[in-house]
Image (cartoon, grey):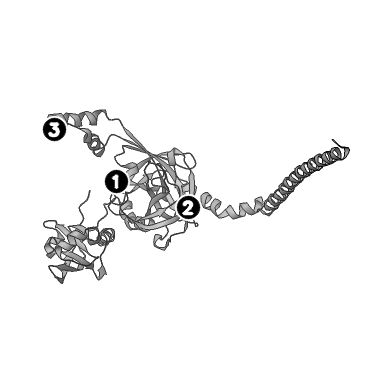
C-alpha cells in the first residue's frame, strides 16, 4: 500500500471520528439547550402563579361559607327495633306458602331476632331558640332512640316533633342552648350552574364539606323510598351515605336544599346527587313545627302521562302528545263526585296545561283540601269542563 493510500485512509478515519464526536457534542448540546429552555419556562410559570396570600383571598368565600354554616350542621344516629317494612323486605325471600302458619312463624321470628337497626345521617338547626333540627324522614324512620351530635362535640337526645314521609322530611327537637341556625333560601331563584356546598356526615365523617354546582332542576323518578313529591335539585357536589338530611347551601350560606339521595350503581357517589328544594321545606315546615300532618288536596285518580303511554292514548283516540290519562277513578273520591271517568284525558287544571305526572301531583299537593278546581278534559272525541272540589289526601 502506498504512503498516499495510508494517508487517505487515516484522513477518512479522522473525518468520520471527528464527525461522530461533533454529532454527539451537538446532540448533547441541543438536549442541554432544550432542558435549559424547559427549566426557564417552568420557572417563569411558577413565578407567575398567585402568591399564597392571593390563593387564600381567592378561597376566602368558600372558607367563609364553611365557617358560617358548619356550626349549625349536626350528625344524627338513630336506633330502633326492626320496622314492619324491614321485616316485609326480609320476607321477600320466603319460599313457602303465601298464607298459613309457616309465614306467620317466619314473621314472628324476624320481629324477635332482627336486631336494632342503626342509621347514620345528618341534619341542621333551623330554629336555634326552640332547638329544632331538620333532617330526612328516612334518617329517623322507625327509630326508638335518636342522638344528635352537635358541631362542638355535645351529644343530645332528640325527640320527633313532626314528620312528612311524602316529602321525606322530618323535624326533631333537642334541649340545648348555644345553638346556631341556618336560614332557608328561595330555591325558586336557584339556577343551573350556581355554586353550592353539601355539608354533613358522610360515612360518619362529621363536619365534611364538598363543593359543586346545581347541575339540574325538577328531577323526578328518583329512587327515594316513600317520597311521593320530588322535583329535586340535582347537584354534582359529593353526597355519600350519611349526608342524608344535611344542608345544600349557596355562597351566602343559605340552605337551598336538603341532601336526600344519589343516583348510583355502587351505593356510593357516582357524580349525581339530589336535594329537596328549600321552597318545599318552607311549605311543610309550619305543619311540622306544630306536629301536625301536612294536609294536601286529593283528586282520587290513577294518572298516566300521555307521553309515557302513547299506545294507550292512540287506543282512546287521543292524538296529541300532552295530557294526563285517567287510568282509574277512586270510588267516592272528589274525582268520582265531579264526574271524572276512566279513560278521560285531563288537559288543563285552572287553565294550566298538563303534560307530566310530577307537576300534576305537585299542583294537587299545593292545593288545600276543600278548594275548587276547574278541569278541562277530553272524552270520546270532545272536550268539556268539570268543576271539582278536592278532598284531603289520606295520611300514611
CB-based contact (under 8 Å), mark 3 and mark 2: no
Per the image, label 1 sits on a secondary structure element best described as: loop
Per the image, label 3 sits on a secondary structure element best described as: loop
Instruction: Name the residue carrying label 2.
Output: 212
Name the residue rendered at 48%, 44% in the picture: 208
Q: Earlier in the sequence, mark 3 or mark 2?
A: 3
Q: Which quadrant holds residue 346?
A: bottom left
Instruction: Name the residue carrying label 1.
Output: 225
- How would you rate the neighbour count of disc 3 (Cα within 10 Å): few for under 14, some for 14-19, many for 20 or more? few
- How would you rate the neighbour count of disc 1 (Cα within 10 Å): few for under 14, some for 14-19, many for 20 or more? few
Whether residue 129 can be seen here: no
Q: Earlier in the sequence, mark 1 or mark 3?
A: 3
Quick one: 198 or 220, which is closer to the camera?
220
Instruction: Give the Cα distance between marks 3 and 2.
Output: 51 Å
Quick one: 379 or 107, which is closer to the camera?
379
Q: Is 374 situated above or below 36?
A: below
Q: Position of residue 348 (x, y in %)?
A: 23, 68
Quick one: 320 or 369, which is closer to the camera?
320
Seen in the image, is 383 located left or right of residue 233? Answer: left
Per the image, label 2 sits on a secondary structure element best described as: strand
Name the residue rendered at 65%, 50% in the picture: 52
Q: Position of residue 340 (x, y in %)?
A: 13, 63
Q: Earlier in the sequence, mark 1 or mark 2?
A: 2
Q: Which mark is residue 97?
A: 3
Q: Position of residue 173 (x, y in %)?
A: 37, 45
CB-based contact (under 8 Å), mark 1 and mark 2: no
Instruction: Give the Cα distance between marks 1 and 2.
Output: 25 Å
Amino acid at each position: 500500500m502506498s504512503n498516499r493510500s495510508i494517508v487517505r485512509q487515516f484522513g477518512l478515519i479522522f473525518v468520520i471520528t471527528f464527525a461522530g464526536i461533533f454529532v454527539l457534542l451537538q446532540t448533547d448540546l441541543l438536549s442541554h439547550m432544550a432542558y435549559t429552555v424547559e427549566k426557564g419556562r417552568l420557572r417563569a410559570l411558577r413565578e407567575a402563579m398567585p402568591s399564597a396570600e392571593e390563593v387564600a383571598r381567592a378561597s376566602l368565600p368558600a372558607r367563609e361559607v364553611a365557617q358560617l354554616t358548619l356550626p349549625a350542621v349536626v350528625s344524627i344516629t338513630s336506633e330502633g327495633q326492626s320496622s314492619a317494612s324491614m321485616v316485609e323486605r326480609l320476607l321477600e325471600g320466603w319460599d313457602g306458602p303465601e298464607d298459613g302458619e309457616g309465614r306467620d312463624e317466619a314473621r314472628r321470628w324476624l320481629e324477635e331476632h332482627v336486631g336494632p337497626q342503626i342509621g347514620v345521617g345528618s341534619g341542621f338547626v333551623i330554629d336555634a331558640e326552640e332547638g329544632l333540627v331538620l333532617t330526612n324522614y328516612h334518617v329517623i324512620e322507625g327509630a326508638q332512640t335518636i342522638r344528635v351530635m352537635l358541631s362542638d362535640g355535645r351529644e343530645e337526645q332528640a325527640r320527633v316533633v313532626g314528620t312528612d314521609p311524602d316529602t321525606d322530611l322530618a323535624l326533631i327537637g333537642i334541649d340545648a342552648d348555644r345553638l346556631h341556625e341556618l336560614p332557608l333560601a328561595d330555591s325558586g331563584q336557584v339556577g343551573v350552574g350556581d355554586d353550592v356546598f353539601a355539608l354533613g356526615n358522610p360515612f360518619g365523617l362529621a363536619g365534611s364539606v364538598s363543593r359543586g354546582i346545581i347541575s339540574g332542576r325538577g328531577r323526578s323518578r328518583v329512587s327515594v323510598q316513600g317520597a311521593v313529591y320530588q322535583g329535586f335539585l340535582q347537584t354534582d357536589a359529593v353526597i355519600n351515605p350519611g349526608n342524608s338530611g344535611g344542608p345544600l347551601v349557596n355562597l351566602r350560606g343559605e340552605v337551598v336544599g336538603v341532601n336526600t339521595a344519589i343516583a348510583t350503581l355502587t351505593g356510593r357517589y357516582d357524580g349525581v346527587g339530589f336535594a329537596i328544594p328549600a321552597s318545599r321545606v318552607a311549605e311543610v315546615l309550619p305543619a311540622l313545627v306544630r306536629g301536625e300532618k301536612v294536609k294536601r288536596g286529593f283528586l282520587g285518580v290513577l294518572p298516566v302521562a300521555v307521553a309515557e303511554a302513547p299506545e294507550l292514548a292512540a287506543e282512546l283516540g287521543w292524538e296529541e302528545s300532552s295530557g294526563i290519562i285517567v287510568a282509574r277513578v277512586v270510588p267516592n273520591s272528589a274525582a268520582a263526585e265531579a264526574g271524572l271517568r276512566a279513560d278521560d284525558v285531563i288537559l288543563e287544571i285552572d287553565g294550566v296545561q298538563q303534560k307530566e305526572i310530577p307537576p300534576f301531583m305537585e299542583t294537587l299537593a299545593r292545593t288545600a283540601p276543600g278548594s275548587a278546581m276547574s278541569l278541562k278534559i277530553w272524552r270520546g272525541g270532545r272536550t268539556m269542563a268539570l268543576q271539582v272540589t278536592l278532598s284531603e289526601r289520606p295520611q300514611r
